[in-house]
Amino acid sequence: MASPLIQLFDHFREDLDDYNDRRERLIKASRDVTNISKKTIFLLHRIVMEESTDDHALAKHAAMRAREKLHEVQDMYAGMKHELEGDRFWRHQRQVSPGLQEYIEALSFAHYLDHGNLITFEQVEETLRDSNGVLYFPLVVSDYLLGLSDLTGELMRFAISGIARRGGRAKANQVCAFVRSCKSDFERMTPYIRELSKKQAITTQSLEKIEDAAYAIAVRGSEYDLPQDMLDDIVTQTISTFGSHGDMKGRSRRRDDETDDEYHPDL
Amino acid sequence: MDPQDLENINALLDRDVELREKIKDQVTELDKKTRTMVGVLNKIHSTPSDSIPVLIDSVRPILLSCQEITSSLASLVPENQFWRWKDMWSNSMRTAVFVASLIEYLSTGALIPLSRVAEILGIKEEWKDRVAVPVEDYLHGLISLVNELSRLAVNAVTMGNFEEPIRISIFVKDLFAGFSMLNLKNDVLRRRFDSLKYDIKKIEEVVYDVSLRKLAPLPKVVPP
């Protein structure tokens, strides 16, 4: 015979189990989202390094392919919608965040390649709506900013691995200016968001790497009184005589830098 | 970043900070109240049982006055954001649960149900996406109750009340059986639950001492 107290705790057990099970499901889903997003980022890096005469078209093509891939994430979020309804979202926000930030990083990278600017908060939200325009869950400013903060690291890789390409130096300078302005925009927000100051430090490192690369190019370029186009031609010719493996260096570097954005499961 | 977007985001962040400040003010008030009550209730360890009702009566109005705070919190917290802000007041809320459960035990000897705690604190069902007493906080409050009762078992004997430890023992064992039914994950609640066995041991020792010396009638649960 169950006493009233046992009945009471039976009810609590259901409540706690329900919460823990959902928590586990969301952690798993978040990991899958992270995985797809990381692959998308690699995909972007790969495509923009392909041989092409028109880098602009290549970037557009990369962005399109990435968006297709990110549909998988959007479908997953659509499936998670009911798990995050009402007050549940904030109860599980910590489980959703890691994957979501990775997704925003991938999405913003694709957006940058396509448009050359930063994806807005509303534009991210647009990708998280169902066919009726209802958000799968509320987008939190901190996730948006932390996702963007990771973008700067990807842009650094993009700029440096592409620096030997035709127009790569001009592009590196563009990226450099862009990352610099991101960094200054985020600065005011760091007191509000705990993890952002740590990420700002990483952004600073990335920025320095691009700056150093741009510096080296400027110094060496000054030794030859030739226009950028001609320098590009000389470099391209030299590379082509060695076979077209100009991207190998960029790839190994990318792997070295991987450690800074490992997935940290919520404890 | 687009200047308009930048402005919007900064506005959002400022709004959250402002809200946090307002909630903090309320939590400070709640904290003051719960600390006062815990201070007064500490006297149960030195108050003879016939004076306990007077002591409890002095705490009840303070407990009821927490209703003002829960209602302010309910008006501050935005829709669906209970879990976003609740960590700010969890500790005070758990203490309030503890106080309510101790008062209930001292006056009726029974376990206070969760719904009754919410009622005493003036927390309405329709606020549940903004202010509520979640199961976890209720259970934390009950563990504090067991901690307190294990002390009371000792001190009651010192004051010459030999039956209290036996009442406490039965009550706490029941509660422990309830907790044992839960699948707790490795968190603070789990650790606090694990420490309950020391409280139970302490209470058992008092019961043993009292029974052995025939200071109290044998409890009904012990087979003859």
Image (cartoon, coloured by chain):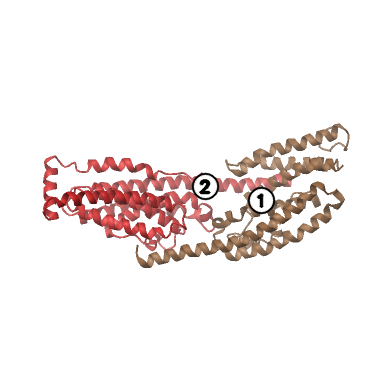
Chain colours: A red, B brown
Which residue was labeled with disc 2? A23
Label 1 sits on what residue type? Tyr
Q: Decide which of A218, A73 is in the foreground and name it.
A: A218
Kind of residue sitting beneath label 2? Arg
User: Residue B219: which quarter of the image?
Assistant: top right
Can you see residue B13?
Answer: yes
Chain designation of label 1 = B
- In-image side of A50 versus B223 (left or right): left
Tell me whether marks 1 and 2 sit on the same chain: no
Q: Position of residue B18 (x, y in %)?
A: 53, 64
Q: In screen coordinates, is B1 left or right of A15?
A: left
| In this picture, residue B20 sits left or right of residue B124 | left
* Residue at x 43% of width, y 53% of height: A196
Cα separation, mark 1 vs mark 2, equals 20 Å
Residue B214: x, y in percent?
88, 34
- Say few, some or many: other residues with alpha carbon within 10 Å of mark 2 (under 14 / 14 to 19 / 20 or more): some
